[in-house]
Image (spheres, rainbow, N blue to C red):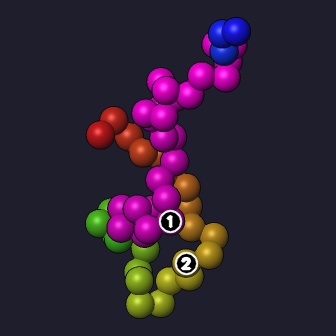
Amino acid sequence: MSLDRSLKTAGNLSAKRSVLTRAERVAKLVTDKRFDPKNGKVLGLAKTLAGKG
């Protein structure tokens, strides 16, 4: 019996992410000078799009 197309995962693992992880967001916000790591709160950070690269 064959596996249904919707259950196959081989091609789905390399999907483009639309939002960065917390560490990536902090790094990007620091480089954009939108976050100060010394006295900024890590909770409630602005979401940052992953971009093209």
Is the residue under label 1 in contact with that under label 2 (CB below 8 Å)?
A: yes
Residue 7, quarter of the rendered image: top right
Magenta stretch contains residue 7: yes
**Element class at badge 2:** loop
Left or right placement of residue 39 versus residue 46 in this view: left
Quote the CA–CA distance across marks 2 and 1: 8 Å
Q: Which mark is residue 42?
A: 2
Span colored in magenta? 4-29
Which numbered disc, 2 or 1, marks the residue that appears first in the sequence? Answer: 1
Left or right placement of residue 49 versus residue 52 in this view: right
Q: Is residue 26 visible?
A: yes
50 w.r.t. 30: above or below: above
Residue 33, quarter of the rendered image: bottom left
Dividing the image into 4 quarters, which one contains the C terminus?
top left
Residue situated furthest bottom in the rendering: 38
Residue at left 43%, top 74%? 35
All told, the count of numbered labels is 2
Circle 1 residue: 22
Magenta stretch contains residue 11: yes
Q: What residue type is labelled 2?
A: Val
Q: Position of residue 47 (x, y in %)?
A: 55, 55
Task: Check disc 1: other Cα within 10 Å, few if <14, some if 14-19, many if 20+.
Answer: some
Work out whether residue 36 or residue 21 is closer to the camera in this orientation and state it: 21
Residue at left 51%, top 40%? 18
Residue situated furthest front in the rendering: 1
29 w.r.t. 42: above or below: above
Work out whether residue 16 or residue 34 is closer to the camera in this orientation and state it: 16
11 w.r.t. 19: above or below: above
Residue at left 41%, top 83%? 37
**Element class at badge 1:** helix
Q: Where is residue 46 in the image (x, y as percent from the top left)?
A: 55, 61
Q: Is residue 34 visible?
A: no
